[in-house]
Amino acid sequence: MPRSRVDHLIVTAASLKEGVAYVRRELGVEMQAGGEHVRMGTHNFLLKLGEKLYLEVIAANPDAPSPGRPRWFQLDEHESVRVPRLATWAVSCDDIRAAAAASPVSLGKVEAMSRGSFEWLITIPDDGRLPLRGLAPTLIEWRSKAHPADTVKDAGCSLIRLEGFHPQAEKVTRMLGSIGFEGEFPVSSGGPRLVAHIRTPAGPRQLR
């Protein structure tokens, strides 16, 4: 049985400026520049949320050439990024191929990626869509010793809990069980959305 745990939360936006402003408005903190994902034509900003746990704002990089394929996380879809939002999440796996094979929901192909000194395997759907409207997490298996959260300064934020809402809540729960998810992720019936409860220097806040 593969094992997995929360690795990071993913906020999508039409631009990094808009995404970072959204996090600043909702959490009252500043994020740190990350880097570029050359193969996907994207770039990101990061916020540390705990040990090996972080929040990522990701957007299409206007200065990068087209990747020649749909970008991940529906970043090419105008309606998906029209408003910055907590779009999906990622879990780190001890065996990404076993987890992807065990999932009853197709999570995409396992591909090798890198950013600077970071190297990882990740699931990417060919069409760039978010499985289960973002409730099914992206799978990651880190190949580098360093983790992005290790390189981000502590802004005094931490994840209290993450919860989800989906019309097929039981399907989401079964999917998480199949990949050996360890941790709490309550899923209730409702319109597809994620809610992250985050402790900040100004008190508990939410990202939706």
Image (cartoon, rainbow, N blue to C red):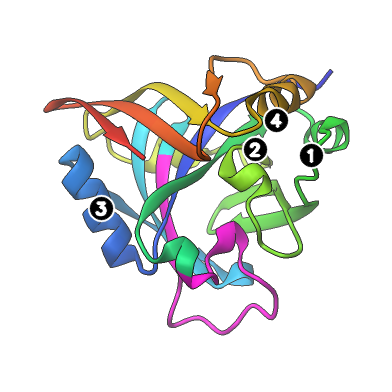
Q: Residue 114 appears at what percent x and percent y?
A: 62, 57
Residue 30 visible: no
Q: Percent position (x, y) of residue 78?
A: 47, 72
Mark 1–mark 4 distance (CA, rounded to whole Å): 16 Å
Q: Secondary structure at mark 1?
A: loop
Three-letter code for the amino acid on which mark 4 is drawn:
Cys
**Residue name at image x 19 percent, y 48 percent:** 24
Eye-nearest disc, 3 or 1:
1
Q: Position of residue 123 (x, y in %)?
A: 72, 48
Q: Earlier in the sequence, mark 1 or mark 4?
A: 4
Q: Between 170 and 117, which is closer to the camera in this rendering?
A: 170
Q: Of the residues tagged 1 and 4, which is closer to the observer?
A: 1
Q: Dot 4 corresponds to which residue?
A: 93
Q: Which residue is mark 3?
A: 22
Residue 136 in the image: above or below residue 35: above
- The residue wearing badge 2 is 136
Residue numbers of the magenta segment? 55-78
N-terminal of the two: label 2 or label 1?
Answer: 1
Q: Is residue 119 magenta?
A: no
